Image: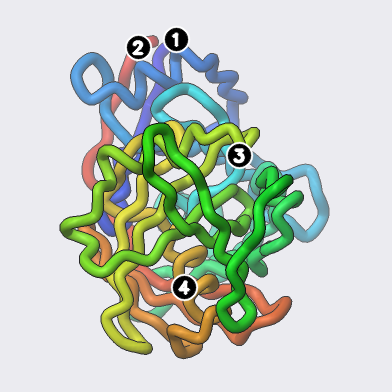
Amino acid sequence: MKLRFTKMQGAGNDFVVLDGTEHPIDLTPEQARVLGDRRFGIGADQILLVERSATPGVDFRYRIFNNSGDEVEHCGNGARCFLRYVRARGLTDKSQVRVQTMNRLLELRMQDDGRVTVDMGAPVFEAALVPFDAAGLTARHEHGLDLWPLQLPGTDTVEVAVLSMGNPHAVQRVADVDAAPVARVGPLVETHPRFPQHVNAGFVQVVDRTQVRLRVFERGAGETLACGTGACAAVAAGIRAGWLDARVDVHTRGGLLTIEWAGGTAPLLMTGPAEFVFEGEITL
């Protein structure tokens, strides 16, 4: 099978984008792994598949595959690339579109400066819905946020905020994100048995009430240069805990994302870059 592809990136989070609007593309996990392989394939954190939607009022279906081959629920940085892609390919001339993911309906809006704003939906803090097994644990309450003790193999216990942005996140506050043990602790949190679907492990440093620094060890992908849903999760947790204001700049290793949240059931709005890198064809 020959596939035309486009390589894109949003704040260093990189993607292989495929157009399945004219001819269906039925990717196997092995094919997704090849596309994401940086030595034997194209190389990407995730593979994004653009499909037409059969739902009235919804413009496209948006499917996401990790470079491990697993199909996942959500990718915010990918959503920004998605909008730039469908506009550049003439699949739509709208500046605002609605797309259906595995479990959420997203609204994507093009800004005049070329950045893209994504309505990411509201965060979900109920442990069972993340899902997170809280049986036998007692959370520490900080304002409106539950911080859960998570026992890691060995003697480590970390305190995490647990929430869903359409995909599961465990966010821990650290004093210095550069010194945080992301490579060691990240995979232990990601695969912890209290997260039956595994989890994205976030490490956030609060600089002041309007700025944070963030690293994320992503579920099925490892540490990436940026994670859009991770940025939203970190800011939502920080606002709920009383650490942050309603508009926050998130400094990732790949670039700047701006997150806004009015609290409660309001959606988080994420604004950031989306760039084309190159195009090509690959035989699978």
Amino acid under disc 4: Val
Label 4 or label 3, whichever lies nearer to me, is 3
Q: Gap in Å between the C-alphas at discs 2 and 3?
A: 36 Å
Chosen colour scheme: rainbow
Residue at screen point 39% across, 10% down: 284
- For disc 1, the neighbor class at 10 Å (few under 14, some 14 to 19, many from 20) is few
- For disc 4, the neighbor class at 10 Å (few under 14, some 14 to 19, many from 20) is many
**N-terminal of the two: label 1 or label 3?**
1
Residue holding disc 4 = 235
* Direction from residue 55 to residue 261 in the image, left or right: left
Question: Tags 2 and 4 in contact by the CB under 8 Å rule?
Answer: no
Q: Position of residue 64 (x, y in %)?
A: 53, 38
Residue holding disc 2 = 283
Q: Nearer the viewer, residue 78 or 156?
A: 156
Residue at screen point 42% across, 33% down: 153
Amino acid under disc 1: Met
**N-terminal of the two: label 2 or label 4?**
4
**N-terminal of the two: label 2 or label 3?**
3
Q: Gap in Å between the C-alphas at discs 4 and 3?
A: 21 Å
Residue holding disc 1 = 1
Label 2 or label 3, whichever lies nearer to me, is 3
Amino acid under disc 2: Thr
Q: Gap in Å between the C-alphas at discs 4 and 1?
A: 42 Å
Residue holding disc 3 = 195
What mark, if any, has residue 154 been given in the picture?
none
Q: Nearer the viewer, residue 187 or 124?
A: 187
Q: Gap in Å between the C-alphas at discs 2 and 4?
A: 41 Å
- For disc 2, the neighbor class at 10 Å (few under 14, some 14 to 19, many from 20) is few
Q: Nearer the viewer, residue 216 or 102?
A: 216
Q: Gap in Å between the C-alphas at discs 1 and 3?
A: 36 Å
